[in-house]
Structures are given as C-alpha cells and as structure tokens.
Amino acid sequence: MTSPITTERQGDILVITSNNPPVNALGAAVRQGLDAAIKELNDDDSLKAAVIRCEGRTFFAGADITEFGKPMQEPGLPTVVDTIEASEKPVVAAVHGTALGGGCEVALACHYRIAVPSAKFGLPEVKLGILPGAGGTQRLPRVAGVQFALELAAKGDPVSAKAAQAAGLVDRLAGEDSLTADAIAYARKMADARPLPRASEKPVTVEPGVFDDFRKANAKRMRGFDAPAEIIAVIEETVGKPYAEGVQRERNGFMKLIMGTQSAAMRHIFFAERKAAKIDDVPEDTQLRPIKRVGVIGAGTMGGGISMNFLSAGIPVTIVEMAQDALDRGTGVMRKNYEGSAAKGRMTAEQVEGAMGLLKPTLNFDDLSECDLIIEAVYENMDVKKEIFGKLDTIAKPGAILASNTSYLNIDEIASATNRPGDVVGMHFFSPANVMKLLEIVRGAKTDKDVLATVMDVAKKIKKVAVVAGVCYGFIGNRMLMPRQIEANKLLMEGASPQQIDKVHVEFGMPMGPFQMGDLAGVDIGWHRDPNRVESIRDQLCAEGRWGQKKGAGFYDYDEKRNPSPSPRVAEIIAEWREKTGTPQHDVTDEEIVERTLYTMVNEGAKILQEGMAQRASDIDVVWIYGYGWPVYRGGPMFWADTVGLKTVVAGLEKHGFEVAQLLRDKVEKGERFN
Ligand code: TC6
C-alpha cells in the first residue's frame, strides 16, 4: 500500500507532504510516514531543513477518531510529535485549512509555523470528551501562554491564523496561494539558526488566579462535563514542572477520559451528526434542484428566524405577510436581531446591511412565483395550511420545492392540497430558528428523492444539522416530548413538586426541566383561552394569568430579572387539584422521575424506530442533542439507554406499567444495543 506521506527534495529542503483525504487525519500510516520522513531529513547530510504540508482541503484535522477504542498502532502520536521536535534540523509546519487537535500538536512540535491567513488553529478534543493527548497541554502554554492555552483547549473553539499569530502560535503568515513556496523560503532562511526553538524547552509562567478565574467565567458552559475540568487541572498541576513530568500527567488524564462514558457519547455524536446527513435510499450523486431564491410565508417569530438563516448564507428571501403592520413588525425584529449580533461584534454593520438587502418583504402572494424553495411558517392549523398549499400549487414555478414548517401536522395531508405532492416536504425548524441547529426534514409518502437531497444540501448551506423523520404526530422530537410531559404532569398530581421534577432534569444535564421549559415557552401555549373552563392545573394557572416568564408568574414566581423562586400559590393549586381529583399520593423519588419521564422517552424513540419514522437510533440522538439541549456527554436518549442497559430500562418501564415497545424487548432478548 502506498504511504499517504511522500517526500520531495527542493534543493536542501525536504518537503514532506501528507495526502490522506478527506481531512488528513493522523492515522497509523500517516504517523509512520511522518516518523520515517523526519529520519530521512536527519540521516541525509545534503538536507538542511524540512517543511510539513498537506494536500487537499486541510492541514491535519486531528488524530483519526475511528482508531479510538482500538489497540494503538505504533508509533503513537505523542512519539511522533516528540520525534519531530527532537529533529536536529529545523522543521516548518505549513498550515492551511484547519490544524485541529493532533494537527495543532504536530504544528506545535515543529520549530516554526507558517500559515495562510484563512487557516484556523484549535484543540477541539474537549468536544470529543478528551484532552489534547500529544503534548498539547504542555507545548501550547509554553508557546502562547496559559490563558490562551486554556481558551483553546478547555473550550475547543478554533481561532484564526491572525489570532494565533498574535498569541505566538504562528510565526508568520504566508500568501493565500503561495504557502508551499513561502514555507520553503522560510525553512531555507532558518536552516542554520541555532539553537532550534523547541516548545517543550520554553519556560512557562502564570499570573496568580488565572485558573480560578477561568473556572468561574466558564462554569455554566462546562457544567456536567468531565473533560474541561481535567484539562484545566492538567495545565494547572504541571505549569512550571519539567515537560517530561507534564506529558506524563497529560497521558494519565487522556487515558482516564478516553475510557469514560462521556467521551464515548461525544464521539458517538460526532459520527451520528455526519451519518444523519445520509439518506439510505437517496444516492449521494442525486442531481440537486437549484435554489437561488427562497420564499417564506409568515413574518412571525418562526418565519423571521427561518428567513435569517438564508439571508446570513447569502441566499435572497421573499417574505410574505397578510398585513403591512405584521410585515413591518417581522422585518423590524429581524433587523434588530442582526443589529444585536453586530453590537456583540459577531457581524459588521456592512454585513447587517448585506443580509437585510437580500430581503424582499411583500404583501403579494404571487411574488412567491420567483422562488425555488417556499417555506410556509404560519400557525398550526391544517385547514389554513391546506389552503396555502392549494394556492401555492397555482403560482409556484414548476420544480419549486414546497415546504411546511409544521411541528406536528401530517405532511401527506398538506401535500394532498396540491397536484405536486412529490415537491412537498416538511422543514421543521426549532425556535429560535436563526439559532437552533436542528432541522427535522419530514419525508412525505410521495416526496421526491431529489427534493430530499436538495433540502439536505440546503440545510448544510445554512449550517443546520438535518435529520430525516417520517410522517407521524410530532415527528421525532416533539413526539418524544409528549410522554415526558404527560408523566411530569402525572407526577405532579401524585406528590412531586415542579421544583423536584425540574431539578432531576437539570442534574441530568438538561438546560431546564419540563416546568421551567413550560414557563419559558408560555404556559398558555395551546390553552383554550376560556378562563371559566378549568380542567387541569395548567388551566388553573392560565386562568389566573400565570402564563409563564413573560407574565412574571407560571409554575414559578419570577422577579424583574426573571430569577425563579418556588410559588406558594402554585403549591396551593397543586394541593387543591390533588384533593379534588382524589389522586392517591406517594413519596416520589428522583429515581421514579427518571424512570417515568426519561425511560418513557426512550420507549417512544424505540416505537419511532420500529415504525421506520427515523432511519437510525443515532438520528434520534442527534435530534435531542441539537433540538432540545439533551446533554451531549450522555450521547442522546438512545445512546444513554445503551449505557444504562436496555434490560434496566425495560424493567423500569414495566415497574410503572408502561407498554414496552416491541423493538426494545427484542433488543434485550438478543443482547443488542441501539447504537
Ligand atoms: C485528537 O486529535 C486527539 C489527539 C490525541 C492523540 C493521542 N478522524 O466534518 P466533515 C471525517 S482528537 C476521522 O463532514 P467538513 C468525517 O467523519 C481529533 N475522521 O467535513 C467525515 O466522514 P464521512 C481532534 C474524520 O469539511 C469526513 O471526514 N480533531 C475526522 O465539514 C468529512 O468531515 C477534531 O475533533 C477525524 N479526526 O469539516 C476535528 N475528522 O464523509 C474533527 C473528520 O464519511 N473534524 N472526519 O461522513 C472536524 O471538525 C471537521 O471534520 C473539519 C472538516 C472541520 C476538519
């Protein structure tokens, strides 16, 4: 087998090139090739220096994640980076694309780093539940300082080449189109400079309080995650210690994390997200329909948010409303959102105008005839939606994709209002639609394959994670939310408080529990709006104006800053309802809350799979991670069920008398997992 690493002499410079598509991951063959190339450099007296560069779209994007969990083939990456750094002759890293994880560590081990301005550097291992295990926690603080190293390694977000240069991680910038030539010239210039700058030999100092301040500043985003805490500990404990001691501590931390469930869960999600983009019976080379202009019907919160995704991606949008004031309000909110981003430095004023300039607000429905993809985002009412689709059928251009943003309704029935059901598809965005990454693509019985392929491609363009769902009430996400909500309400009646149920969910790692979510979304959503018709605790809350955070009162009381506190009035209402309905009371344990609100979600997920409403268990996990804030370190509900043990889940469901999905039973019988 030919090596992905080749060497070529340019006079006295050895150019070491990796060609390992798609992202030059540092698999065994790459590591062996690099090791051999450094030997070649040092064994040949006619060579003075080397350049390490990559073919294709990027510099090494990290270790090969598919090798994790398997026996490591020698040489390991920690050995390879030490070999590079120990070279007697200078080695220059020539970086384009993304130098991530092990790739960044290779660059750190090189004596010099040159990068194109568009390159990015990062240590995203933390997002896979691990830590930089090839000297990154030791070399980066020595090269760029402790604060920068903490930012990169414990948060995992990449930085631009310019920011990397400012921190000392990049020595010089190359021309965007002349990286290799510039790197060779640089190597030649530094060929005789001694001593060689070796990162591991540099001293590292730290200001007092840096670690505690960092922990404090990032406590919220790091809550529940093992890896960031370990990364901070490794750097804190080893700062000022010799490199050899430091890498040993790093290795111990790495091994501890990689063996853990969190890392397995996060690696599962990395691949699950990419797998979700593939539709089993839609070939990858399916001819896509061109999408040059998008139409959005409805300028409310959803319609506005949906439009912003396209505008931000440079795709023009025609947005239609029924009345001028609603249209003005909608476009005003969009502008305000963009200006808010600009105020936070996430956009320039020019970009705001650029995005808004692509928006065509109109009251004329016929203007949608110029659109290639039209997304309906009006309120949830089948008759209204059918009327709209009937109208669209008469005006949309041939081949235009007609999508509904419905979160529950039957796409097939909506499609039946047209004479082109093959062009109809569900595109279910999650609120706020310009922020949330999930997009459920609902595949109708007659949806054409090229329509599916096109909307999956569009999703990628607007930076969404798309998952295909079949037609069923609530699709994947909202369907699984229902048993959770039903059980949470029952538990309330049987003896639990909203605080206890929410606490169990928050401690599990959710951003909030079911009642906190109700208060945020609005307790009055779906309420019949008749204060005299009180049939449940929720009706009573609504009748008393406790509509949630927006009213300063819901299941909780809120102060002006929207800080919640338990509500004595809600406790009274709950007590009244328990008595009125004669519901038997018992001490609800946290364990029971988990079994009844979370195992039931797994059970529903199994039914969804069994009915073919999701393509694979990992798709369900992706929905819950990106749509509802399920903690990524638990890998989504189906992966989590695997870690709990499906036998335990079934036993928990049976204990409370739930009807267990056949698929779940079958899996237990066969000793299988979901993932
Ligand atoms: C590390 O380095 C630890 C070191 C310590 C060692 C001791 N390995 O994302 P895309 C695949 S940990 C294997 O669609 P993009 C990916 O699955 C690693 N495979 O492309 C997909 O396969 P598919 C630290 C990988 O252009 C294909 O490549 N590094 C790896 O949107 C294309 O990927 C990271 O965490 C990998 N490392 O984005 C970086 N990376 O076509 C992880 C990708 O069969 N990677 N694949 O579905 C990324 O963030 C992105 O892939 C990207 C490119 C930004 C590099």
Image (cartoon, rainbow, N blue to C red):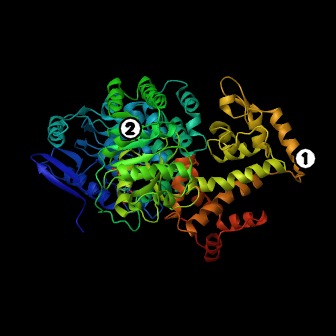
**Residue 195, quarter of picture:** top left
Between 416 and 669, the one nearer to me in the picture: 416
Between 401 and 94, the one nearer to me in the picture: 401
Residue 454, x across and y down, in percent: 35, 55
Residue 491, x across and y down, in percent: 79, 51
Residue 372 visible in this rendered orientation of the protein? yes
Alpha carbon distance from label 1 to label 2: 55 Å
Q: Is residue 417 left or right of residue 448?
A: right
Any mark on residue 579, and which?
Answer: 1
Above or below, 444 against 254 in this view is below
- Report the residue marked by disc 2: 364
- Outermost left residue: 11
Between 427 and 23, the one nearer to me in the picture: 427
Q: How many marks?
A: 2
Q: Amino acid at mark 1?
A: Glu
First along the sequence among labels 1 and 2: 2
Residue 83, x across and y down, in percent: 31, 50
